[in-house]
Amino acid sequence: MTLTGGSCSLQCPWSFQPDRSVTSDLISLLGSEVQLLHPTTGVKCDAPLPIALHLITPDTILDPEWYSLSVKMDGISITAVSQEGLYRASRTLIQLLEQGKESASIPCLKITDQPRFEWRGMHLDPCRHFWSVEFTKKYIDLLARYKMNSFHWHLTDDQGWRIEIKKYPKLTSVGGWRKGSQIGPYSRREYDSIPYGGFYTQEQIREVVAYAAARHINVVPEIEMPGHALAALAAYPELGCTGGPYEVNKGWGVFEEVFCPTDSTIHFLENVLTEVMELFPSEIIHIGGDECPKESWKKCPKCQSRMKAEGLKDEHELQSYFIQRMEKFVNSKGRKIIGWDEILEGGLAPNASVMSWRGTEGGVAAAKQKHTVVMSPGSHCYFDHYQGDPANEPLAIGGFTTVQKVYSYEPIPKELTAEEGRYILGAQGNVWTEYILSPEHVEYMAVPRMLALAEVLWTPKEKRNEADFIQRLEKEFPRLDAMKVNASMSLYQVTIRPKRCATPGKIDVHFSRPFRNLPFRVVVETNGSRSEQISPDFIEIENKSTVSASLIDTVNDQGVVHSYPISTRHFVFSKATGHPLILSDPPNERYNEGGAFTLVDGITAQEKRVNTEWLGWRKGVTITVDLGSEQDISHIGIGALNETYGWIHLPEVVEFFTSEDGINYTIAGIDVASLIHPEGHEPPKGASGPPQGRKQFMCDGPAKGRFVRIAVKHIGNIPEGYPGAGNPAWMFLDEIEVR
């Protein structure tokens, strides 16, 4: 951008002066937006200010989305090589006019701009929870505002089939509805019985596609195969290996029931994709390909016969065979396929593109094989993850991805050469909706992380500046509010972290500002009393307390109050809290964020799995706590986590000891994980074991001692019937309680 000096008046109305080749749709759309931003000044004008729109002959050197925008005293001029470039320029113009509305002027300047990557995408999942056409358009408007150009619409999954297929009406009449939904944290495995569903008619699909096209956004449909297929199997059970019966699934996760790759199944999916391709002009069609268990194929005579006939050595090659059959069909229609990085397993289809989500490895492997790649790693691009302190955020699937982390992302992996890096088309943010129940919640999870990713994908790497981005983002929040977008303000959270105090039995609670040197208020409630401090580095507590912190509300020039989110932590105290302890073996480095002190920091880990509240091992551990003096003890306990879907299992047994001298120990009790499943909780299919979630291992009874020792025995490898069977189990432990 070049500033040419001075301010250009916007007091007069505008008139468009387009080239003949500029489409009337663009002029109409831009005209309605511009008129809304015209300041009311009462100034009389001799003539409207012109906004000239020029299309120049395409140049092989210039990017198709390249544009030049010039603001002078006598008007505005936009030049581009395509309608798409004109539209991207119009987004910049709208933002300039928004900034200038109050002062009725904007800087005189010239901008020459083009994107770094050709694929700048956002994803939305209406299968787990369904979104109206109206909201889907609003979501597309956000993509358009930030110059994104790809909308990945995830239309089928185990929990619902969301697109009308005329040839197979039961896909929506049966597959579009489930008998209930999973509720609460995954570990509870609890479900309601409220029927849930919905689908888009073909007319509605065309409406959304046309709406996106007017904003130069390509809609990429995803039809899941061969896994994530229960909704389709419920409608047409003959497509599965067993013939059913099947049900549209109420819960989240990965399920064994998948498409059986017979000729009849492939023909069925070819018919489905034929109708899909008639609705979506996108050159690329997403066929899923992820998380396809092979257990049903291993037991299926039809699958084993197919493998033998085709000379396939294993079920991974059978999946590759299936994907290649589908690709050949899609290619015959002049289209291409893209799939999640599992389509690499067993051999990549000849012309397929890969969407890399399980880290960057799949993207690296595909690019080295000269296949185009869209990067979408969970570490930086999954916007269903927490974005602020999970203790103060709505329930999410897990993870921790701040807006700053998104902004730090580099889509071209360092393992690639410059030539290989050319196969990286761009990146995409994903919004999976297992735990997202409303449109407002979708917005909360997507914005402002979408803005950070949009800048990563548009701006040259060397010109990105996080501090400058945050400053501009702060000015964008009021505009988002005016647009009735429920943007997350997690960026402004004050972080509350307990740390070891020099005095045993006490805790230092430290605070960190989110950015800049903004003042914040700390409120401490203890035993009914309440105290406040402004911007302390830390405070000291020694009793059960609730500590809250938030930036101090501000008032802008228009007198509007800006309220900031409040962070809250609840601290409980026992005889062990804040006391020194020794571990026989350190936690695994992946789950050791708070160190050993996590076990006595006063915070009892909740159902949200937060790394700062749990320590993780893949073997047993013995923990010794020094209470400082001999104590009467009636209770010893330690928390453990059971989330078997994530390979996290309870200890086999926990033994409790006390000692007066730290040398000679007396056993105080033993606790073993219960094997009873309370009503409403379910173990993995075919497995038995204790209920999912947090369990307190404990012993009660009179004892004396200065030292408490807890010996926690690891179960070893994950038992058969559980996810990850045969691999070392994870063991997560949290707060030690001594009374």
Image (cartoon, rainbow, N blue to C red):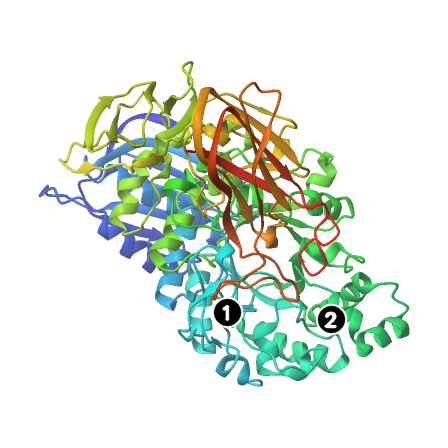
Up-down relation of residue 730 to residue 664 (above or below)? below
Residue count near mark 2 (Cα–Cα under 10 Å), binned few <14, some 14–19, many ≥20: some
Give the quadrant of the N terminus: top left
Question: Which label was assigned to residue 172?
Answer: none
Height in image: 220 above or below 545?
below
The quarter of the picture where residue 468 lies is top left
Label number found at residue 250: 1
| Amino acid on which the number 2 mark rests in the picture | Ser
User: Residue at the spot x=47%, y=43% of the render?
Assistant: 454
Q: At which x and y percent is residue 549? A: 29, 30
Query: What is the residue that sits farthest to the top in this orientation?
Result: 502
> Residue 358's spot in the image, x, y percent?
64, 48
Rendering quarter of residue 667: top right
User: Measuring 60% from the left and 55% from the top, which residue is drawn there?
Assistant: 645
Q: What residue type is labelled 1?
A: Lys
Q: Distance between the residues labelled 1 and 2?
A: 20 Å
Residue 32: x and y in percent read: 27, 57
x and y percentages locating residue 218 in the rendered image: 52, 59
Q: Residue 296 carries which label?
A: 2
Using the image as rendered, state which of residue 420 and residue 698 is in the foreground.
Answer: 698
Q: Residue at x 66, y 28 (%)?
A: 585
Looking at this view, is 11 or 639 the one in front?
Answer: 639
